[in-house]
Image (cartoon, rainbow, N blue to C red):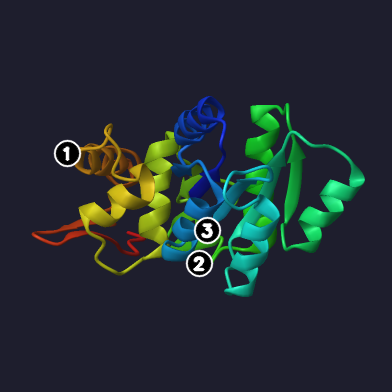
Amino acid sequence: MRVLVVEDERRLALALKHGLEAEGFAVDIVHDGLSGLARATEHAYDVIILDIMLPGLNGYRVCSRLRAAGSDAGILMLTAKDGEWDEAEALDTGADDFLSKPFSFVVLVARLKALARRIGSRAPQRTVLGDLVVDSAARTCARAGTPVALTPREFAVLDHLARRAGEVVSKREILEEVWDSGPDSGANTVEVHISALRRKIDAPFGRTAVQTVRGAGYRLEADGG
């Protein structure tokens, strides 16, 4: 899941980025309303965490402009303000959910996952390829009826491939989707996680679903054995 955090408190924004990336999300951060509007307009995000009190352009106006432009991203308003009028205004401008500071990170993650389920993804929530089942909403994977334990990053890579099943997906696309091409990503990062997926979802079951297309990237195929 790709997440955009629009938050002017830089320490909070960075903490959210690190925490959400540890959960397997790809995260961008910006610190003012105009930058948030531009980034959300230029790139596709599944969910936008949008502070209300922002410099340049407040969150209400960012949200309303995004909806007017046809954005279908899930929008979670995040603010230090509290009260039913603020929540009502957030929802009236097109937000899907509302969370007041201070908040529990566990609750925030749960809200994001619930929001993603509620708005629906642009791709199917549950992908079945032969005897491999990838559930994007529950973030679970099973092969031949056997649950397969994956790290958040491994699942994110598999989920992206599953959403594009049968298509060739380049390393760059995977990096941008899962790691956002940050400093902790590199040329061999995808290879390491692809190898881990093969060890977990293919090799123990005698399958070869995760395929390398030389010079192009990777492809996930139905391989039920």
> Which element is circle 2 on?
loop
Give left or right: position of 110 versus 216. Answer: right
Question: Label 2 amino acid?
Answer: Ala
Residue 188: name its quadrant: top left
SS for tag 1?
A: loop
In this view, which residue lies farthest toward the front? 56
Mark 3 belongs to which amino acid? Answer: Leu
**Residue 118 place in picture, x, y as percent:** 70, 58
Q: Which residue is mark 3?
A: 37
Q: Residue furthest left?
A: 215
Determine which residue is flagged by label 1.
188
Say what amino acid the circle numbered 1 marks.
Answer: Asn
Q: In front of the other: label 3 or label 1?
A: 3
- The residue located at (37%, 65%) in the rendering is 164
Q: Is residue 127 above or below residue 182?
A: below
| First-in-chain label (2 vs 1) | 2
Does the image show residue 130? no
Quadrant assignment for the C terminus: bottom left
- Report the residue at 72% width, 63% height from top: 94
Cα–Cα span, label 3 and label 2:
24 Å
Left or right: 178 as drawn, with respect to 175 = right
Check disc 3: other Cα within 10 Å, few if <14, some if 14-19, many if 20+: some
The label number, if any, that marks residue 123 in the structure image = 2
